[in-house]
Image: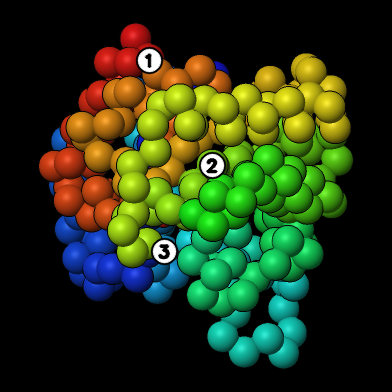
Amino acid sequence: MKTYIVGNFKLNFTVGEASIYLHKLLKAVPNYRDIEVVVAPSTVALQPLSLQIDRHKMKLAAQNGFYRDFGAYTGETSFSQLRGLVDYVIIGHSERRHIFGEDDKFIQKKVAGAVRNKLTPILCIGETESERAFGETADVIRDQVLGGLADVSAEDLDKVILAYEPVWAISSTKAAKEATPGEIAEVVKLIREILKDTYGVKVAEKVPILFGGSVKKTNAGAYLMVPGVNGLLVGGASLILSEFIDIIEIAKRVSA
Ligand code: PGA
């Protein structure tokens, strides 16, 4: 399986800044066949960056999208509109869940809508600090995995990527803590078991599981060595071009 390094710019960079970043990134990173480099800029940057990107080298992701193809949905961007611009779409990010009130039912429709439009959803799941403190992590993860994937058939499961992002480890969270490799391993194992029990061993093994939450060049190597982790979803550190390049190089070394 490839190693995925996904940079989530969130609400940062103008279109011009994102374009300069991509230009420099394309120059700095060789064509690694076993590393899938993905950048997720703001929606407004997707069209120009889709013309600029070298798809053999890296791919684009949208940070969000809507499951209806068209209609009276002010402010939304449909997966059918994103199709052709991006290969991936981040769905159910904790900021969407907690700031914009997206629940598992809504996220479930988005995941299915992305798959229907031939985009690969990167479905984010993760418990909050208080859910962890109350011993609810396993239940929350189970609900988010099964809820988010409820409309995805076993045949389509290999078109989905999961990202475990404990909310308490995301750098924008107040007093964010870095997760330990042991904490990550435990939850990633649980996610794989849920997939195996629901969809069968064969297809469950094919689903990439990424980790995200305060990933930096100093912890990327250790996180990529956690059994069952197939890549990283990088937020804050991806805004610093040199740091993101270092993380890609670390992934190359670890996967060699
Ligand atoms: P962070 O964000 O790397 O800044 O913690 C990760 C994410 O929210 O996807």
Determine whether the residue tagged by mark 1 lies in a helix, strand or loop: helix
| Three-letter amino acid code at the position of disc 3 | Leu
- Name the residue type under label 2: Tyr
Q: Nearer the viewer, mark 2 or mark 1?
A: 2
> Which numbered marker is on residue 255?
1
Q: Which numbered disc, 2 or 3, marks the residue closer to the eye?
A: 2
| Separation of marks 3 and 1 at Cα, in angstroms | 29 Å
Any part of residue 120 in sight = no
Q: Is residue 169 above or below residue 186?
A: below
Of marks 3 and 1, which one's residue comes earlier in the chain?
Answer: 3
Q: Which residue is mark 3?
A: 46
Q: Residue at x 73, y 26 (%)?
A: 193
Q: Position of residue 235 (x, y in %)?
A: 34, 52
Q: Nearer the viewer, residue 48 or 87?
A: 87
Residue displayed at 78% across by 38% down: 156
- The answer to whether 204 appears left or right of 162 in the picture is right
Tell me the number on the disc at residue 175: none
Residue 3 in picture, x, y percent from top left: 44, 26
Q: Secondary structure at mark 2?
A: strand
Image location (x, y in percent) of residue 52: 31, 54
Q: Residue at x 30, y 24 (%)?
A: 221
Q: In the rendered image, which residue does mark 2 sit on?
A: 164
Give yes or no for contact between labels 2 and 3 (Cβ–Cβ under 8 Å).
no
Q: Residues within 10 Å of mark 1 (few under 14, many from 20)?
A: some
Q: Residue reaching furthest front?
A: 134
Is 190 rendered above or below residue 119?
A: above
